[in-house]
């Protein structure tokens, strides 16, 4: 892996999934008091346009130790100041900007977002090598100028809303979806990105392609019995962890729940069981417990 995708490189490396062998990023620390085991692997999607609702969710959920995703809806509705707000509280902020433009423009956008303290930043791998490398360079430059840790830039393989004929029509790819996602993930590693976003259905193929030194961030997480919504390729939290995911993005199953804290704790419990003691169906654990990110401190959500 390039230097910027190691534990000592881009993003500061602190508190990420521990090295499982073969250079998987991470210098995890033991869980600290007040956090919920398993929550350090969860990224809650703040896909809301209402600032009051977003603030309430952060205040409720941050003490558990989860990270937060700011996506396009919130960026356009509330502005990038939310990155500053969350990062300033010591929280990990996944900026799901899905940058996709000419390299010069992407460099400038990534530089601006890197300066705000983002932890993760997404680009579309379909934008090509030069664009993706420009994002890594821009993010690092912006963070250095602001004196903050550089975000890890990760690439979107194939949107989880695509499947079947819709996938073929949208991408024009000749390979089956899983093989195409793995091919793009291989590009991400070669181009210097720290990880990729892929659906649960492609996790095993992608992990086999990129090896243990690349982060896999997985949306489309639905606890058993939850509606799919507009996600087509989904899995339970335990299934995704068993398939090799490092971080799970959860949105509506938590944010739309009557009790978001209870919903988060239930999902975190399933993650912790899969990490530490096997899956609910009795399967053997595949990964050791994760550490807690240094940017996430007990009671951080109270600040």
Image (cartoon, grey):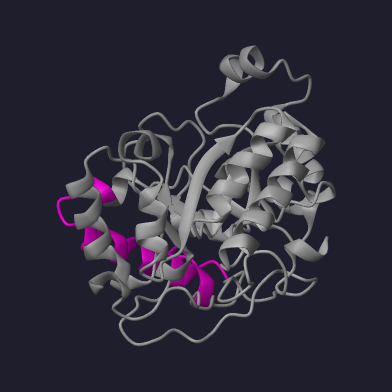
- Magenta part, dominant SS: helix
Q: Is residue 238 left or right of residue 1?
A: left
What residue is shown at x 64% (from left), y 52% (from top)? 139
Give the percent coordinates (x, y) of residue 35: 34, 78
Give the percent coordinates (x, y) of residue 294: 50, 78
Q: Quadrant of the N terminus?
A: bottom right
Q: Is residue 235 left or right of residue 211?
A: left
Give the percent coordinates (x, y) of residue 253: 30, 47
What residue is shown at x 62% (from left), y 55% (from top)? 142
Asked if the magenta segment contains residue 200, the reply would be no
Work out whether 215 lies above or below 21.
above
Asked if the magenta segment contains residue 276, the reply would be yes
Which residues make up the magenta segment? 255-284
Asked whether the viewer can see residue 223, the reply is: no
Work out whether 136 lies above or below 75.
below
Q: Quadrant of the C terminus?
A: bottom left
Give the percent coordinates (x, y) of residue 236: 44, 51
Asked whether the viewer can see residue 61, the reply is: yes
Total labels: the figure holds 0
Q: Is residue 246 left or right of residue 231?
A: right
């Amino acid at each position: 892996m390039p230097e910027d995708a190691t534990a000592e490189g881009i993003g500061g490396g602190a508190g990420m999934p521990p090295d499982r062998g073969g250079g998987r990023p991470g210098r995890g620390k033991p869980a600290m008091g007040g956090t919920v085991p398993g929550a350090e692997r969860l990224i809650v999607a703040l896909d809301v346009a209402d600032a009051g609702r977003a603030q309430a969710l952060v205040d409720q959920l941050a003490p558990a130790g989860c990270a937060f995703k700011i996506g396009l809806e919130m960026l356009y509705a509330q502005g990038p100041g939310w990155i500053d707000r969350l990062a300033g509280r010591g929280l990990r902020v996944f900026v799901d900007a899905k940058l996709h433009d000419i390299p010069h423009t992407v460099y400038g956008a990534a530089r601006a977002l890197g300066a705000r303290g983002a932890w993760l930043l997404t680009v579309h791998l379909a934008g090509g090598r030069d664009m993706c490398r420009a994002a890594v360079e821009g993010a690092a430059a912006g963070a250095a100028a602001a004196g903050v840790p550089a975000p890890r830039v990760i690439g979107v393989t194939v949107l989880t809303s695509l499947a079947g004929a819709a996938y073929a029509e949208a991408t024009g790819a000749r390979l089956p979806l899983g093989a195409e996602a793995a091919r793009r993930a291989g590009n991400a590693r070669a181009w210097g990105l720290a990880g990729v976003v892929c659906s649960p259905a492609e996790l095993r193929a992608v992990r086999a392609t990129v090896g243990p030194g690349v982060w896999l961030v997985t949306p489309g997480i639905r606890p058993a019995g939850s509606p799919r919504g507009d996600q087509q390729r989904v899995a339970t939290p335990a299934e995704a962890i068993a398939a090799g995911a490092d971080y799970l993005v959860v949105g509506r199953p938590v944010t739309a729940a009557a009790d978001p804290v209870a919903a988060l704790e239930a999902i975190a419990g399933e993650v912790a069981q899969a990490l530490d003691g096997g899956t609910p169906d009795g399967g053997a654990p595949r990964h050791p417990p994760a550490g807690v990110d240094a940017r996430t401190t007990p009671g951080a959500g109270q600040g």
